[in-house]
Image (cartoon, rainbow, N blue to C red):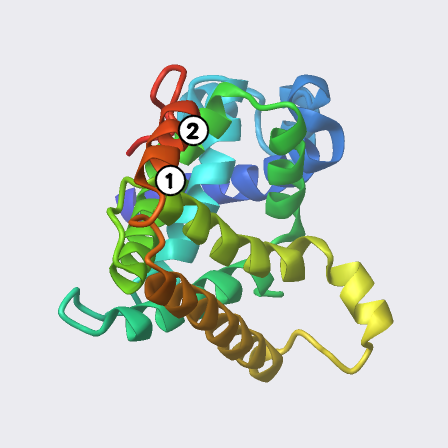
Amino acid sequence: MADREAEHLVGTRARLVEVAGEEFARRGFADATVRAICERAGVNIAAVNYHFGDKAGLYRACVQSKYEKSLAHRPPEGGLGPERPAEERLGVFIATMLERMLDSSEPAWLARIMAREMVQPTEVFDEMCDHFIRPQFAMLRGIVAEIIGAEAESVTAYRAAYSVVGQCLFYKHCRAVVERITPGQGYDLAAVAGIAEHVTRMSLAGLRAMREAGADGAAGDAWAADKARFFSGDGRGMS
């Protein structure tokens, strides 16, 4: 009896997350209502308070649960230890990031919610950055810093890492354009692997060129001034 009750509670929670995710993506956090979510999920309205505390707690659970599941399934380090060559770790990082971004089995509502958050950030967006995005970016920044021979906290490392991420985001956010301009591209597993290989080659070529040019060395005074501007403010750019 207890096992059946526990299964029922787990099922109710999971159903609420899926339905709420779709509602939040379609209407936005402010316009989505707990009543409409519970009616679609076929549960009592009190279930939201019981499982999540309030609407904000439900919204947070929608985003966190999907990110946690995605990262657990495809961890950014891909099982490689820090002793492996940085070039190899970069390739794995890019491949797993693209797989998470372009996984067609993931619900479309998560991407729509994050698109809304980019335009109108809520406190959940700050939590997402702190708990999920910032640690991954720190890992990537460390890898590219090792390749270019720069400090991980340097402006160079930050911008190089942003450039790597930008290439991957293009295939996510410009997917509709890519599929129309190059309809043979595809986004199946083989295609995503090919994209990852290409992005890795492009990134390594640029990073190696930066290393050969002495990315941080030749213009120390200029980089120092740039760093002061780059990290001015409340310091949230550092991690």
Q: Quadrant of the C terminus?
A: top left
Residue 160, given in percent of the width and then of the height, sits at: 43, 52
Looking at the image, which residue sits at the far right? 180
10 Å crowding of disc 1: few (<14), some (14-19), many (20+): many
Residue 211, given in percent of the width and then of the height, sits at: 33, 63
- Taking the spot 37% from the left edge, 62% from the top edge, the residue there is 213
Q: Which residue is mark 2?
A: 230
- Taking the spot 43% from the left edge, 24% from the top edge, the residue there is 229
**Hey, which quadrant is residue 52 in on the image?**
top left
Q: In the rendered image, is residue 106 in sight?
A: no
- Distance between mark 1 and mark 2 Cα atoms: 7 Å
Residue 25, given in percent of the width and then of the height, sits at: 68, 36
209 vs 35, left or right, is left
* Residue 93 to residue 87: above or below: above
Asked whether the residues under the numbered discs 1 and 2 touch, taking CB atoms below 8 Å apart as contact, a structural biologist would say yes
Disc 1 on helix, strand or loop? helix
10 Å crowding of disc 2: few (<14), some (14-19), many (20+): some
- Taking the spot 57% from the left edge, 25% from the top edge, the residue there is 44
Q: Which residue is mark 1?
A: 155
